[in-house]
Amino acid sequence: MQSNLAKVLHPIAGLSIISHVLNAASSLNADHTVVVVGHQRAAVMEYLATSHPNVITAVQEKQNGTGDATSVGLTALAATGVALKDQDNVIVLAGDIPLIRPETLQPLHNLDRDAVVVTAIEDNPTGYGRIIRSGDLVIQIVEEKDASSQQRDILEINSGIYAIKHQHLVNHLSNLSTNNASTEKYLTDVVKAIADSGGKVLASLVDADDVMGVNDKEQLAQANGLLSDRIAQYWLHQGVTMLDPSSTWIDVQVNLAADVVLYPNVYLEGTTSVESGAVIGPDTVLRNCKVGAGAKVISSRCIGSTIAAQASVGPFSYLRAETSLAEHSKVGAFVEVKKSRIGRGSKVLHLTYVGDAQIGEESNIGASTVFVNYDGEQKHNTIVGDHVRIGSDNMLVAPVEIGDGAYTAAGSVITENVPPGAMAIGRSRQRNIFGWVLKKRAGSKSAAAAEKHSQSDIFPPTNNSEEA
């Protein structure tokens, strides 16, 4: 993968590769699940302990092939006190097949056989083991490195997914040879041994995309694209409108209601949920957000936020974690909101930063207002009541509280609490210095423009005039 991140930990549609595999495998309702780890195992084991705590991990110290990995897994299972019976079904999956579906695995429950191999038809089978058949039965799987030119022409490939009776693994794993091109112990040799001894090995033919392996960044991108298409098709069939499915990216844990509208270049990530009638996009990212019915989010980025029914966001808004917008509230252009609650019907429409704040109902925050929440060491809270009017270009220096129904004048710096119904003015009085330009900028275009006016306009004859 040319990456410091373990291959199976690379994300696809919001989940790691290994999580996709384990989630599909969970549909089998297996009694026990073992993950065999090798390369970069510390990171993989740490991830599994957090994300899949019920799986057993086993360490393959030396990457000595799939047969050896299977032995390592069975040994680890036995070490937990589990004693498998001869007829128990052991299912072996590759850890790098993120597109595997639960329904693809269901034929592995077939008990009328000694083993089942999941296969696919590949137009370009390079790199895969080839399936050798005798009628409907599989008699051998030949790895490409060991295949003859005639065998390499076979298009049916081995997916690396097997269901094998435990007794056959006990009988044959210990006898595996490394006499092959890779000098490894192949699990595929167990399949041949079963067939050679008269056992019944069936093939379960599936779509090649379902068992696509990911070994490099190109294949990772291909898998991302295929899964994105699959997810988009699912939601289209559930009544979601997408103007351009090819530019719409939806993670697997996202939940959408019917009649949601998604414009182009929308990214719905993590556990985001969107209720009916909401309109998202274009050019929008929602990660771990909840969007209510009929809400609109336009050209914005929202992380860990709740946007209630009929609320609107954007364009060019940024909602950060722990932000909550109540019903019918509005956050407009070039507004950033962090760890704040905006009440029902309240508006923050232009060029504003809201941080660590509680805003009540039906209040209006004027353009270019900043909730000054940080003193250089700690964050502080601001409380704005119901039906408050904050003038444009205000600085609300926390901790501070603006009472219900209060007003603040444009350009104010508010450092003290404002009582309910009061008008707060926190700015110096304007001074006009008459004639300043004519005296200090004589000969300039500004002075020429000023000279067009009468002397009484430039130097008003009042007691309050202040001359340059």
Image: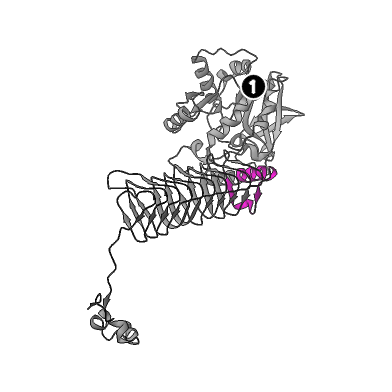
The kind of secondary structure element at disc 1 is strand
Q: Within 10 Å of the Cα at label 1, are there few (<14), some (14-19), or many (20+) other Cα atoms?
A: many
Vertical relation: 441 (above or below) 91 = below
- State the scheme by which the image is colored: one colour
Q: What percent of the width, then of the height, locates residue 463? A: 24, 77
Vertical relation: 374 (above or below) 169 = below
- The single residue placed furthest to the front in the displayed view is 463
Residue 134 position by quadrant: top right
- The single residue placed furthest to the left in the displayed view is 468
Residue 92 position by quadrant: top right
Q: What percent of the width, then of the height, locates residue 446? A: 32, 82
Vertical relation: 266 (above or below) 136 = below
Q: What percent of the width, then of the height, locates residue 170? A: 59, 16
- The single residue placed furthest to the right in the displayed view is 135
Q: Nearer the viewer, residue 75 or 435?
A: 435
Residue 245 shown in magenta: yes
Q: Nearer the viewer, residue 181 or 398?
A: 398
Q: Quadrant of the C terminus?
A: bottom left
Q: Residue at x 63, y 13 (%)?
A: 86
Q: What percent of the width, then of the height, locates residue 141? A: 65, 30
> Does 25 sit left or right of 463 as displayed?
right
Q: Residue at x 54, y 54 (%)?
A: 298
Mainly helix, strand or loop, the magenta region?
helix
> Does 305 sit left or right of 239 as displayed?
left
Vertical relation: 50 (above or below) 424 = above
Q: Which residue is mark 1?
A: 164
Three-letter code, disc 1: Ile
Q: Which residues are magenta?
A: 226-250
Q: Nearer the viewer, residue 202 or 198?
A: 202
Residue 3 shown in magenta: no
